Image (tube, rainbow, N blue to C red):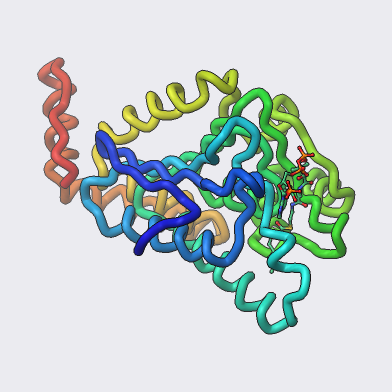
Amino acid sequence: MEYKNILFSVEEGIATITFNRPKALNAMNSETMLELKDAVTACKDDDNVKVVILTGSGDKSFVAGADIAQMQDLEPCDALAFMEMGHETLRLLETLPKPSIAAVNGFALGGGTEISMACDMRFVAESAKFGQPEILIGLIPGWGGTQRLSRLIGMGRAKELVLGGGQIDAGRAYEIGLANRVYPLDQLMEETRKFARKLAGMPAFGVKMAKHSINFGYDLSLDNANRLEVECCAQCFSTRDQKEGMKAFLEKRKPNYIGR
Ligand code: CO8
């Protein structure tokens, strides 16, 4: 697929997806969502991709939400289709068997916060702003904001943001667990890539199982979730990387992982 609204590159096992509609502060129209879905699928299918970074072009915005100009006159059935496509894409991203990091370089509003929450981690610029301002334009979040936000920061804080429509800065986002790390804007990509390289060097099957266990155990009873963890951990013993990791530890040397 030819991309018009995103940039996509793979380097050193790290795929970078950059939202690139600077005139609209990288707002997501349906074309951009389709491109995102295609890029995420490519990351899933490509064994060379170990980690995915999502960011926005320019120094002002990650994603300023769904494209309001495109949404304005939607019929309910078209709005439903747009929302379903968003959910499908973000679930694909969330359940990608590889880690993803949102490098939030500015506004992450509405759909922008929602996309960042479908990533495993959020590394954010000091200038970043998060929020679910949909209520201010007569909507509610439609790409998982009412669900993922309360899971991440708790119901009371989620309700404050979703019902009140306010924005929070990077410091507050860090305080409430929405942001993992905060950096000056000019260091954001470098620091994000540094951590991505670290993840890319981990035993890939272990990373996949750890993510699977956290993602799919979350909504289970503790007994069932613990059982899931046991099974995921047991599967790691089928890999060459587990043997190598333990052998290297005992031989006091660096492990040489092959991703199997
Ligand atoms: N959609 C379309 N265009 C946008 C958007 C957007 N979400 N955000 C900014 N733009 C455009 C502006 O219209 C403007 O265009 P132009 O230069 O042609 O007038 C340009 O980007 C620059 O924006 P501003 O001049 O407003 O820049 P400021 O620095 O003054 O303000 C803000 C920046 C605060 C980010 C401001 O632009 C803003 O409030 N944007 C809207 C934020 C918002 O409400 N986002 C939520 C949208 S709803 C949503 O995400 C729902 C998701 C899932 C539902 C799907 C349902 C079908």
Residue 87 visible within the image: no
For image coordinates 52% across by 59% down, the residue present is: 32
Q: How many marks?
A: 0
Percent coordinates x, y for residue 221 in the rendering: 56, 60
Relative to residue 98, is residue 88 depicted above or below? below
Q: Which picture quadrant has residue 157?
A: top right
Relative to residue 57, is residue 236 depicted above or below? below
Percent coordinates x, y for residue 160 in the rendering: 85, 46
Residue 178 visible within the image: yes
For image coordinates 52% across by 35% down, the residue present is: 103
176 sits to left or right of 42: right
213 sits to left or right of 141: left
128 sits to left or right of 47: right
258 sits to left or right of 100: left
Percent coordinates x, y for residue 4 in the rendering: 46, 56
For image coordinates 73% across by 58% down, the residue present is: 146
For image coordinates 54% across by 40% down, the residue present is: 56
Q: Quadrant of the N terminus?
A: bottom left
Seen from this angle, which residue lies furthest front? 23
Q: Which picture quadrant has residue 122?
A: top right
